[in-house]
Image (cartoon, rainbow, N blue to C red):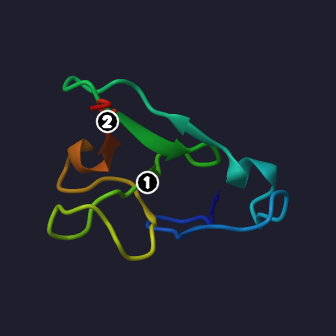
Amino acid sequence: MAYTGGNQGSVVMEDSGTSSLGPNGELWSWGGREDWGAYALQSFWDSGQNVDAKDGFDNPRTDPVHTRGWRHGNQRELTWNAVTPG
């Protein structure tokens, strides 16, 4: 998957090595640990852009995924929690 650039840029699936932003457009990293124990998945190319995992109603996103710099003034809605096997 690759970040396409810009605030709220699309996250797209594409062949490895074909990102318009170069190879770093395909790299992702975990941001710092938030005080509630979660981490934001952020673009390596632009660490201010995190994958926006929830829709406008705070439900898991089912439409095309994009990034967002901030949402509602914090990153709580842009974080991913580990799923406990069970």
83 sits to left or right of 66: left
In percent of width and height, residue 5 lies at 60, 64
User: Is 53 above or below relative to 81?
Assistant: below
Residue 34 placement, left or right of 72: right
**Residue at point 17%, 56% (across, down):** 72
Quadrant position of residue 15: bottom right
* SS assignment at label 1: strand
- Three-letter code, disc 1: Val
Q: Is residue 52 left or right of residue 4?
A: left
Residue at the far bottom: name it: 63
Q: Residue at x 81, y 58 (%)?
A: 16
Q: Which residue is mark 2?
A: 83
User: For the C terminus, which image quadrant?
Assistant: top left
* Badge 2 vs badge 1, beta-carbon distance below 8 Å: no
Q: Position of residue 26 (x, y in %)?
A: 70, 52
Q: Nearer the viewer, residue 84 or 68?
A: 84
Rounded to the nearest angstrom, the CA distance separating label 2 from label 1 is 17 Å
Instruction: Give the residue at the far right of this rendering.
Output: 17
The local secondary structure at tag 2 comes to: loop
Circle nearer the viewer, 2 or 1: 2
Residue at which label 1 appears: 51
**Which comes before the other along the chain, label 2 or label 1?**
1
* Viewer-proximal residue among 74 and 53: 53
Furthest residue toward front = 86
State whether residue 23 is above or below residue 68: above
> On screen, 34 above or below 69?
above
Spot occupied by residue 40 in the image (x, y as percentages of width and height): 39, 39
Q: Which residue type carries mark 2?
A: Val
Q: Which quadrant, please, contains the N terminus?
A: bottom right
Question: Which disc, if any, is residue 17?
Answer: none
